Amino acid sequence: MKVLLTGGAGFIGRWVVKQLLNEGHQVWILDDLSNGREENIKEFINHPGLMEFIHDSILNETRLEELFEKNQFQLCYHLGASINVQDSIDDPRTTFNNDTIGTFYILEQCRKHDTKVVFMSTCMVYDRCTDETGINEEHPTKPASPYAGAKVAAENMVLSFYHAYGLPTVVIRPFNTYGPYQKTGGEGGVVAIFINNHLKGDKLSIYGDGTQTRDLLYVEDCARFVVSAGFSDAVNGEIVNAGLGKDISINELAVLVTGDPKNINHVEHIHPQSEIQKLLCNSKKANRLLDWTPKVTLEEGIERTMTWIQQGGLQ
């Protein structure tokens, strides 16, 4: 199929590109490189299935019109977004423009060309988990940051195009994803940051008391989930979660990485109001509709990520 992938030079996008190419599809990547890096997709540049890398923004409507008209995409994976919670609090306009307005521009082109949309949302739209059955798709949302608010707004637009126009769309909410090619600094890279600091002999810094938990999903499992959502009619018009199904406190994660609690520092939280105390995913819907289950344990995923960083992974 002819596939447009926004944000394809990003961390998760890179693995989605790899799977799509392995499956024999023709792939166009659109990325403004605000989060992504050309180095992430360097190995694919000469692949016969990678048709073009376009360095541009999803906010460039004229460019989007040209791309859709010229290439007649059958499927669009929309991963391009501002993803930093702290940045969204400091500069909500940029996040809103990229994540909400940019998504609308993508939807308009997909509507004109009858192109299915797989929209990458986030577990950060949810309120905290309250029991051990985990967060399913019916769980209350709580946009505790402008990032989450922009994603919720975009989700509603994505689903409205399904209901109003019959456009095949799906909203996917992967939980905290980690693995090779994730930046070792910045938002969302707690595993990579911890591993990198551990390998450098630095102490691991934890925001707050460290009792907050995360459901950590290995990136190749995430990419399988993302890709499968594009090729299933069963998820059209749906919201679907994906996670490991086990949560771990940040304190426990730090000990798992460093092996020594003495190598851990607790520091004051920058934006405590946007912290979600407990995140635990219920992926039963993904299993039922997509036959998807995670394959990589947290311990194995950490080992793979550590090996990648030790071997000179991108910083």
Image (cartoon, rainbow, N blue to C red):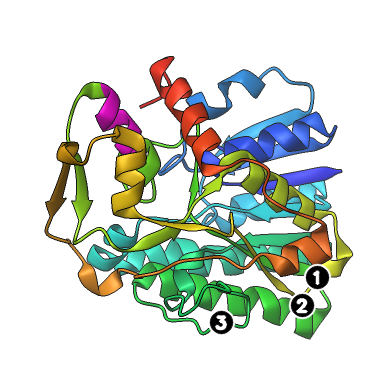
Assign the C terminus to one quadrant of the image: top left
| Spatial CA span between label 3 and label 1 | 19 Å
- Which numbered tag is attached to residue 162? 2
Which element type, helix, strand or loop, lies under badge 1? loop
Q: Nearer the viewer, residue 274 or 2?
A: 274
Few, some or many residues within 10 Å of mark 3 (<14, 14–19, 20+): few
| Left or right of 71, for residue 209 | left
Q: Are marks 1 and 2 in contact (CB under 8 Å)?
A: yes
Looking at the rendering, which quadrant does residue 236 occupy?
A: bottom right
Q: Relative to residue 157, is residue 20 depicted above or below?
A: above
Q: Where residue 263 sits in the image (x, y, percent)?
A: 17, 36
Q: Relative to residue 310, is residue 281 depicted above or below?
A: below
Question: What is the three-letter code of the residue carrying label 2?
Answer: Tyr
Q: Are marks 3 and 1 in contact (CB under 8 Å)?
A: no
Residue at image point 15% right, 38% down: 262
Q: Nearer the viewer, residue 296 or 226?
A: 296
| Left or right of 222, for residue 55 | left
Question: What is the three-letter code of the residue carrying label 3?
Answer: His
Among numbered discs 1 and 2, the one appearing first in the sequence: 2
According to the picture, the residue beneath numbered tag 3 turns out to be: 139
Q: Which residues are magenta?
A: 193-199
In this view, the mark in front (1 or 2) = 1
Residue at image point 44% right, 79% down: 127
Residue at image point 83% right, 50% down: 72
Q: Nearer the viewer, residue 118 or 45?
A: 118
According to the picture, the residue beneath numbered tag 1 turns out to be: 236
Q: Relative to residue 146, is residue 68 depicted above or below?
A: above
